[in-house]
Amino acid sequence: MAIIIPNLNQLKGRGTAGERRVAEVLRRKLGDECLVWYDVAVGKKRRYPDFIVLHPQKGLLFLEVKDWEPKTFKSINPNDIQRLTSNGLRTDPNPLAQVRGCAFALVNQLKADPVLQQTAAHRLGQLKMPYGCGVIFSKVLRSQMENALPEDSRNLVLPDHLVLYQEDLRDDVDDEAFQNKLWDMFPYQFGQRLSEDEINRVRWHLYPELRIDLQLSQTNLFDDEPSLEVLQDASAMSLPDKIKVMDLQQEQLARNLGAGHRVIHGVAGSGKTLILAYHCQYLAQMLSKPILVLCYNVVLAVKLKTMLQNKGLGDKVQVHHFNGWCIEQLKKHHIATIEGSEPIYKRQVATMLAAVEDGRISREQYGAVMIDEGHDFEPEWLQAVAKMVDIDDGNLLLLYDDAQSIYRRGGLNFTLSSVGIKAQGRTSILKMNYRNTREILHFAYEFASEYLTGADSKDDDHIPLVLPESGGVSGPKPVFYRLPSFSEEITQAKQQIVSWQAEGVALHKMAILVVTLEQAKPLQDAFKQVNVATQILVDSKAKKAYLPDDNSVAIMTLQSSKGLEFTHVVVVGVGSLAPEAKRTASDAKVLYVGMTRAQQVLVVTGSVSEAEEAKGRGVFVKKLLKQATDLAS
């Protein structure tokens, strides 16, 4: 069966009966290798063909579906059709001319991409794949059209081989016969099969919102159309091992997120944030109320806010870390924080939760709520947030990965329905990691695998642990250095950053992750000596002031790095992790999160004295040293 995007369930409330019928027929009668998109805008003028079919061997086929009754037809020419409707005489574009206009809009865009151009001298500059157009009349029989128009006239306005009729959509039509009718709509065949990279190239052009940008960064997930200069640079347009578009599961998931409560369980680097951002962009065009995006991590909140503001969504989408949102709600509703001996941030959260419960803070404030890194949220937080969603729109999206649950011990020990999240039957799992090279993912997972265990959930009202699978990207092997002291770790980190800078890596694409706050300051001092700018993110004020695109190296704790990504990462101070046995599992998760922040290159350092080692400390240093030695051999 063909892959239909969006899936058929999402078409129930969209389009005409004929379009839904055609979608079902295409899904059943085309093979697994076919991709079929419904109602996608193409070209600068945003034309909408009903269906685009992509077959790796046959090429691109554009289809226009009409539910017109044959008795309404009055006249037809190559450009227009006149029909007598209940509202009087109506002139519509000839559907064949209409769909050709849509096809040319996309084909001209694809032809500007050198990667998709023919290289043979007699076809130089032409599109590498064939393309065709066709029309489907879901309520017209072939005999009715033949009786209405002689063959010579049909060849001028609607040639027989470019039109399917009602009887062609019957269930008893042979699959191969149906396919042949579609393939006959192509004016020519090249006999050359598109590669997976070339198919992704088409998707890259077809849907800008699916792009994972050329710099492999979350900051510019939705870059605008590339300039002509970029399109003319074949090296810039070639697809490396690292894909730059969502995979088909991600694309289907992003486009199929309808109203209601939804949960996505996704491993680190599986594109959860990409899907969240796409959904924000989609809903911002539809909802009158604002959209709330929440996460636990202050630095991640800053990055998400910057990303969405760069896309012009700042007025429609509000991004907060949970504690910051609590403070904002208390100020908005003029509610004083309760007194007590606990830290003020805990009292602010408690005050907000009580005010939501007793009605002092209004509910249903938002048209949609998106929760990133939901594994770090307490049950009472989720319960309060679920009440913030407009009951009519009901859009709530929870993103979750238990392997990255570093602020809460043991993952979720409650059902989602118990906190008001009604997502049964609307949960999805993303297992493929696209952030890290396979070497980094293997290194991080091998280290932490014994601590990332958990029974699979029997239903989608719980959160299962999802183990990652590599997206197939290759890169250098991670490196671990065991050093005599932390001061020598600083020297190693400084040398590494300076070396990467000399290779042309931008400073904002590098990060140094520390275990404790005290380790950050001497690192910053060391980089001042070599005139390398840094952002040190160790307190709330600095985290809120984080500038993701600033030309500086980010220095932060492993916990603060959660949800972020950098091409080059140094993790220092791992000898101070797991100082006692009861912290081994939780600290292993923290280190796993830190290592999986690295997209391309990972360096880890650790030091432990003989005296500390004799006391059973530095267990991660020994484990990583053995792992790195085995990897190098």
Image (cartoon, grey):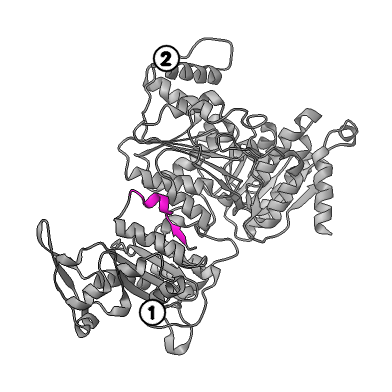
The image shows residue 300, relative to residue 330, as above or below, that is below
In-image side of 535 versus 588 (left or right): left
Relative side of 132 to 523, left or right: left
Circle 2 Cα neighbour tier, 10 Å, few/some/many (<14 / 14–19 / ≥20): few
Based on the displayed image, in which of its 4 quarters is residue 375 positioned?
Answer: top right
Residue 153 image position (x, y, % from top left): 19, 82
Q: Is residue 204 visible?
A: no
Q: Nearer the viewer, residue 597 or 152?
A: 152
Q: Which residue is mark 1?
A: 184
Between 551 and 263, which is closer to the camera in this rendering?
A: 263
Q: Is residue 524 magenta?
A: no
Q: Is residue 42 above or below residue 116?
A: above
Residue 509 visible in this rendered orientation of the protein: yes
Dot 1: what SS? loop
Q: Residue flagged by tag 2: what amino acid is it?
A: Asp
Q: Secondary structure at mark 2?
A: helix
Instruction: Give the mark nearest the N terminus, 1 or 2.
Output: 1
**Quarter occupied by the C terminus:** bottom right
> In this figure, which residue is indicated by the disc labeled 2?
358
Q: What amino acid is found at the position of numbered circle 1 in the picture?
A: Asp
Q: Choose between 223 and 88: the one closer to the eye.
A: 88
When the figure is inspected, residue 113 is found, relative to residue 615, above or below; the finding is: below
Q: Residue furthest front?
A: 172
* Inter-mark Cα distance, 1 to 2: 67 Å
Q: Give the percent coordinates (x, y) of residue 412.
A: 61, 31
Q: Which residues are magenta?
A: 3-13
Q: Residue 107 at x, y = what percent?
A: 37, 72
Give the image location of residue 470, x and y in percent: 65, 55
Q: Does 383 appear above or below 397? A: above
